[in-house]
Amino acid sequence: MKTDLSRAEEIIERYDCAEHNLIAIMQEIQAEYKYLSQAALLLIAEKLDISAARVYSVATFYENFSLEAKGKHIIKICDGTACHVRKSQPIYDAIRDYLELSGKKKTSDDGMFTLETVACLGACGLAPVMTLDGEVHAKMNPEDALALLEKVRGEEAAQ
């Protein structure tokens, strides 16, 4: 299945195919497609007349760029010192089991959730903390985290 990159082409054109806009172009394409596919990276390189290696090196240097498709809902578990000490790892483990993730896999088979860890969410006084689609959930535990995901699944099913 070939991905339609017409929106990516529009984004690149809007930035005048200028190399100095590389990061902005990549950010906007990722926002549109939820990740940077190999096809999108090659398109960027071609349109900006730079090497694919240069585009790839930028995509892998910055942590906010993703080369894997992400789920509809992004879960981030804080593993900073305060959250780690207050047991964020069991929350991560419970969600990972719930989503049936293994190895380096971060996204559920149904494409609904992507699970990530972050070094710090900046809410140490509320530890342990997780975010779901950018919304902070404080003083979490495995049971509350799974209940939250079940709620989201229920809302999705009702639509």
Image (cartoon, rainbow, N blue to C red):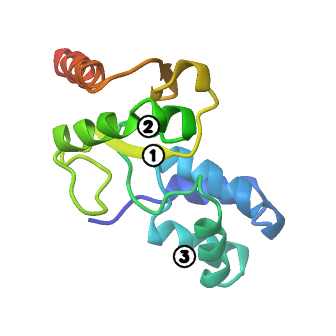
Q: Quick one: label 1, few (<14), some, or many (20+) residues within 10 Å?
A: some
71 relative position to 123: left or right: left
Cα distance between the residues tagged 3 and 1: 28 Å
The secondary structure type at the circle numbered 2 is strand
Reading the image, the residue beneath label 1 is: 117
**Residue drawn at 66 percent across, 85 percent down:** 51
Please state which of residues 102 and 3 is positioned toward the viewer in this rendering: 102
Q: Nearer the viewer, mark 3 or mark 1?
A: 1
Query: Disc number at residue 42?
Result: 3
Identify the residue under disc 2. Answer: 77
- Percent across and percent down for residue 24 are 72, 53
Q: As drawn, which residue projects farthest toward the front?
A: 85
Q: Are marks 1 and 2 in contact (CB under 8 Å)?
A: yes
Quadrant the N terminus occupies? bottom left
Q: What is the distance, in whole Å, between disc 2 and disc 3 at their CAs?
A: 32 Å
User: Residues under labels 1 and 2: Cα distance?
Assistant: 5 Å
As drawn, is 105 to the left or to the right of 131?
Answer: left
- What amino acid is labelled 3 in the image? Leu
For mark 1, give the secondary structure: strand
